[in-house]
Each structure stands twice: as C-alpha cells, then as structure tokens.
Image: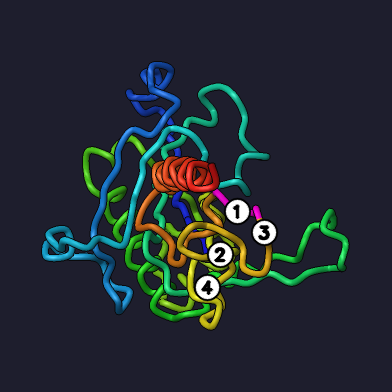
Amino acid sequence: MDHPGCSIIAKVVPNSTSTSRMDYSSSGLELGMFYKGDINGKIPSQKHFLDERPDIQCHASTNILDPAGRGHAKSGKSNDTLTFVSTLNIPLSVGYLELRSSNPFIHPRIFLNYYEKPEDLYLMMSSLKLSREMLKQPPLSTVWGVESDVDKEMSDEDWEKYIRKKSFSSPHPCGTVKMAPESQGGCVNHRLQVYGTKNLRVVDASIFPTIPAGNINAPTAMVAWKASRLIEEDYKNKS
C-alpha cells in the first residue's frame, strides 16, 4: 500500500512584480489542506471541506515536488515555481510483491497498482481540478501561470491520462507483512511475531493491515514503542 501523489505546477508570469520576492520563499511546504474528494471527479464543494473523514491531503510548495520534473529544474528566477501536490490519504487500490528468487538479498518486484480502483482515480481528479481552479483565481492568477499540460479544457479522459503519467509515490509504502490472522493472509501476530518462526519480529510500517490516513512516520514510531514493550514483557516472563 502507498499514498499516491500527483501535482500541478505553476510558474511566475513574465514581468510579474512578484518575481523578485521569490528569493525569500521557504524551501518547505507552505500550505496544507485536508478535505474530502468528490467521488465523481468534480471540484469539491464546501461540504467536502466540512467532512470529518477527509481523504485528500493537498500541499503547496515553492519547490518542484514532482520527481519527474526535478531533473529539469534549474536554479534562478527563470524557474520560479509553485507546486500543488494532491495525495490520496485513504486509497482503495492495493499493490503486491513478487519474489524474483529464493535469494533473500534479491529485491522483489513491486507492483503499486495505483488507481486499480476507479474511485481512487476520480478522487485524485477531483483534487487536481480544485488545484487548477485555485491557481486561476486572483491574486494567484496575476502571479502564476498554470503548466501547459492542464492550462486548457480537459475531459475526464484527458485528466486520467495526465494522472497516470504524472503520479508518484509519497513515499509511504507499507503493509507488505501485515498483522492479521494467518488464515486471512497475515504474516505477523498481534505481538509482531512472524508466523512459523521463533524469536523473529517485524517492527516497521510493513505490519500495518491498512494504510494510515496520513503520513506514516508517527504510526511507525508507535509500532516501535509498542514492540519495545512486548520484547521487555517476553524477557521478564522468561526470567
């Protein structure tokens, strides 16, 4: 499992009075928004922002966060950009791994399976449409010009092509060794012990049975904290 991301990039309009101010912008994330995407791929309305279970996380940054675009980035004012990144917080699509061989040091094949479920595609489409609409409104529109790929009338089919071409990992991969009953495909039990082994635990994001609805750093730290207590308990019980 992973949180797929996709971005829209805008560049400073030539002769904009704001161009000179870009040197003072932070290199980090300037804005974060959480809201519910529209399941039909339409621009989210006010009710989507009031929903208590948001499934979209949107960031704005003066960096190029799209991995495909970083190789073309240049320093200096000629490349001043504003990036809106949309991330699916609760994707329904699930990927899988395939072993290349019995050698544990050979990396497996990873199939992320982004947008296998149509719902994921339309939620991402909904968020990107909102990002483009925000960039078209003043005062942003007086400073930034939306990238040519989306600065035109686009059908849902056009958006799908854009999303499949531009999507990237957050990266928040997890769930490859999920905690669940062995009969349900689980690899570790509720004490993080690997089924069929002794004295072997897995303590990282791979044990998540479902992907957290947000960044996975804190949940992974919580798993590590709990594992330390479990190991301590087992040690004391053996003494």
Can you tell which mark lies on residue 188?
A: 2
- Mark 2 Cα shell of 10 Å, populated few (<14), some (14-19), many (≥20): many
x and y, in percent, of residue 187 in the image: 59, 68
The kind of residue on which mark 2 rests is: Val
Using the image as rendered, state which of residue 233 and residue 47 is in the foreground: 233
132 in magenta: no
Q: Of the residues shown, which amino acid type is indicated by label 3? A: Lys
As measured in the structure, the alpha-carbon distance from the residue carrying label 1 to the one carrying label 4 is 24 Å
184, above or below 60, in the image: below
Q: Is residue 218 left or right of residue 169?
A: left
Q: Which mark is residue 198?
A: 3
Q: Earlier in the sequence, mark 1 or mark 4?
A: 4
Closer to us: 26 or 151:
26
Q: Give me the disc on residue 94.
A: 4
Is disc 4 placed on a helix, strand or loop?
A: loop
**Residue 201, label in figure:** 1
Q: Residue flagged by tag 1: what amino acid is it?
A: Arg
Amino acid type shown at disc 4: Val
Query: What's the distance in space between the residues labelled 4 and 2, CA to CA?
Result: 19 Å
